[in-house]
Image (cartoon, rainbow, N blue to C red):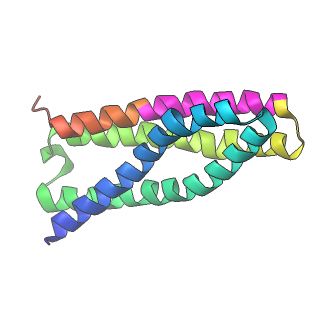
Amino acid sequence: MTPHAALYAIHLLAALIWVGGMFFAWMVLRPAAIETLEPPARLKLWVEVFRRFFVWVWVAVLVLPFSGAGMLHMGYASLEAAPRYVHMMIGLYIAMLALFLRVSALLLPQLRAAVSKQDWPAGGAVLGRIRRVVGFNLLLGMMLIAIVAARPSF
């Protein structure tokens, strides 16, 4: 395996963990939790899901720029020489990171506080805001994957 192939595999796995986890949470876990759990249990579940999933997102958030920079340096003389889709990937990563940081640093502590106080209406409201941000981040992630897979030459 070449060094570039190893970095590419690590990069791809990190992206799949992050975007795939959001897809699973949005499309599978969320509807199942709504259908089967009462609000207090559902909110407690989400606190635990975020705690566990965000460990993996943090790994992805750290791995992606390092593996991406490594591939960039192996493949191109400079960032300016890289194809446009690489620039788009970097921009979308920054946007996704900002949204993740919003959830992780601002909204998740509010959810934890509401659940610890057993303030279920406040927790539900925060979870709704988290859902919207994660949904938008999921769309960005899927758009990023589609762009990179297509490798447009504009």
Q: Residue furthest left?
A: 153
Residue found at x 25% / y 61%: 9
What quarter of the picture does the C terminus occupy?
top left
Total tally of numbered discs in the picture: 0
Q: Is residue 89 above or below residue 51?
A: above
What span is in magenta?
A: 121-138
Q: Is residue 61 magenta?
A: no
Give the x, y percent position of residue 64.
36, 55
Q: Position of residue 34 (x, y in %)?
A: 66, 31
Left or right placement of residue 128 versus residue 88 in this view: right
Query: Is the magenta region chiefly helix, strand or loop?
Result: helix
Classify residue 3 by image quadrant: bottom left
Q: Identify the residue at horizontal 87%, vertical 35% (top origin).
A: 119
For residue 145, side relative to residue 150 (left or right): right
Where residue 62 appears, as percent x and y from the top left, is: 44, 59
Query: Is residue 88 visible from the viewing direction of this image?
Result: no
**Relative image position of residue 66 (x, y in whole percent):** 34, 61
**Residue 63 makes an appearance in the image:** yes
Quick check: is 125 in the magenta stretch? yes
Viewport quadrant of the N terminus: bottom left
Give the left or right position of residue 36, taking residue 19 as reference. right
Q: Is residue 36 above or below residue 79?
A: above
Q: Residue at x 41, y 43 (%)?
A: 19
Q: Depth check: 68 or 113 in front?
A: 113
Q: Height in image: 86 above or below 65?
A: above
- Quarter of the image where one finds residue 93: top left
Q: Residue at x 72, y 32 (%)?
A: 126
